[in-house]
Image (cartoon, grey):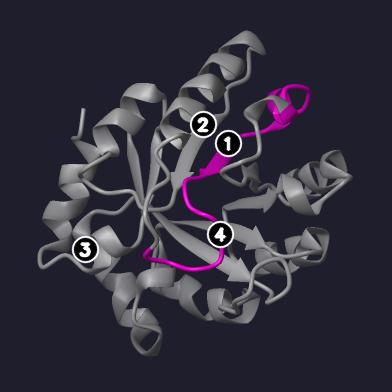
Amino acid sequence: MIKIAPSLLSADFSRLQEELKMLTQAGADIVHLDIMDGHFVPNLTFGPPVIKALRPHSDLVFDAHLMVEQPSDYIEPLHEAGCDMVSFHYETEPHADRVVQLIKKYDMQAGMVLNPSTPVEVLQDILPALDFVLLMSVNPGFGGQKFIPYVTAKVKRLAELIERTKSSASIEIDGGVGPQNAASLIAAGANILVAGSAVFNSADRTEMIRTLRNSQ
């Protein structure tokens, strides 16, 4: 089943509660929450207190994407804020197993994120412990960037690696995702599409989410 995860990074930050309710009404499956610390990426967004304030206003799955230098510091606060999924960057954490175990300790789904130029093979040993892998198809830090084409082949390689390692991890893709590339990404093996600008800049967000989900 293909799931659509609109990113609040592209929402109107002055109207987050209303934007969140709109996503629920439009048929989104997941809300993607980009958490940036201004160090790993040159931008700042929101953190656990904002997420906690939003949680009562939606029953959607909350998916926290940590773009931070010390991901382990965020795990307990994100659990307390009501997150369901948490992913952190391979590039930021030398003790990945420790962070994965911490996420699972709090009964959240654990994922790892790879930047566009990081090969999927680095995850071979830890894949069976992961619930999902998030592949960046833009360089992280800002919304509205153009999709990097070579990531489609990377999705396929990850799908093959998941099969070889007998992992059950889902493949999430984030960055420049829209109707123009959704079908090829799904064909390559992606089953969670993060879409920010494509959804929030659409005149009919319900139809855009439906279009992305049915791009097969």
- SS class, disc 3: helix
Give the residue pinned by disc 4. Answer: 140
- Is 132 included in the stretch rendered in magenta? yes
If you read the primary sequence from the N terminus, does the residue marked by circle 2 or circle 3 appear first? 3
Closer to us: mark 3 or mark 4? Answer: 4
Quick check: 51 above or below 31?
below
Q: Distance between the residues labelled 1 and 2?
A: 4 Å
Give me the residue at 70% from left, 23% from top: 128
Determine whether, in the image, residue 158 is placed left or right of residue 88. Answer: left
Label 1 Cα crowd, 10 Å radius (few <14 / some 14-19 / many 20+):
many
Q: 10 Å neighbourhood of mark 4: few (<14), some, or many (≥20)?
A: many
Spatial separation of the CA atoms under disc 2 and disc 4:
20 Å
Q: Give the range drawn in magenta.
A: 122-144
The mark found on residue 25 in the picture is 3
State the SS at label 4.
loop
Residue 145: x and y in percent read 40, 61
CB under 8 Å between discs 3 and 1: no
